[in-house]
Amino acid sequence: MALTVRIVSCFFCGIAAGLLIRLAGRGKPFFNFSGFEEGKSRDTDPNPVLRLLKNIGRNIRITGPYFLLGIVLSALFQRYVPQDLMTEFFGGNEVFGVLMAATIGVPLYACGGGTIPLLQSWLLDGMSMGSAGAFMITGPSTKITNLGALKIVLGIWYFLFYLVFVMAYSFLTGLVVNLLI
């Protein structure tokens, strides 16, 4: 169910963002790619098998700590945060729960694989599906790496508008999901 919520909500988020860009742009260039330069390739090993193994190792080194962080956070939440508290925050008052999930998704989101165990724990403890959806929309949209690139490409005003749009969209999506499910 959570996968369906995420796919459908991201599809409509993309449509809404595209329409807003079209309206806000009014024919002007919207993106500025002058801050990006092509980096030096690290794929220099002539042996394709070694090159693949080096890329896999590099990816594990980069994403592995975040995945482990998500597992540790999930274990800590399961062990030390009372179930009644999670139910109260994310499930009891649905509007407040969705707002909390959309807000907490900004600083807490590390990577998709790392937050899956955390979300599983929260859903088992009473988090509503709308709150989970809001968390999973806000988190990836506000990862620090994504925000750095967006700030360069969009400029400060469009960047701030992007942040407001993501927070509002995830909040509204969470409310709609809670009404439908």
Image: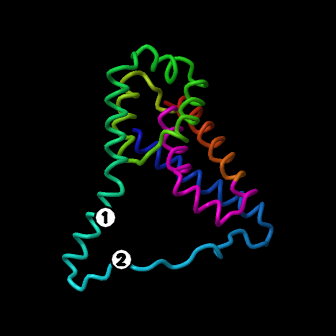
Is label 2 in a helix, a strand or a loop? Answer: loop
The residue sitting at 35% across, 32% down in the picture is: 74
The residue sitting at 41% across, 48% down in the picture is: 111
Q: Nearer the viewer, residue 12 or 150?
A: 150
Q: Magenta stretch: residue 151 in it? A: yes
Q: Position of residue 167 (x, y in %)?
A: 63, 42
Number of marks in picture: 2
The residue sitting at 25% across, 76% down in the picture is: 51
Q: Position of residue 152 (x, y in %)?
A: 64, 65
Q: Amino acid at mark 2?
A: Arg
**Is residue 128 placed above or below 24 in the rendered structure?**
above
Residue 78 is left or right of residue 24, and the answer is left
Instruction: Mark 2 and mark 1 in contact? Answer it, CB < 8 Å.
Output: yes
Residue 44 is left or right of residue 129, and the answer is left
**Is residue 150 placed above or below 42 in the rendered structure?**
above
Where does label 1 land, which residue? 58
Q: Quick one: label 2, few (<14), some, or many (20+) residues within 10 Å?
A: few
Q: Position of residue 163 (x, y in %)?
A: 66, 48
Residue 89 got which mark?
none
Instruction: State the image quarter where residue 4 is shown.
Output: top left
Q: Amino acid at mark 1?
A: Arg
Residue 79 is left or right of residue 155, and the answer is left
Q: Work out which residue is located at the far top of the displayed protein and give it.
A: 84
Residue 42 got which mark?
2
Q: Magenta stretch: residue 155 in it? A: yes
Q: Nearer the viewer, residue 69 or 103?
A: 69
Q: Which range is magenta?
A: 131-159
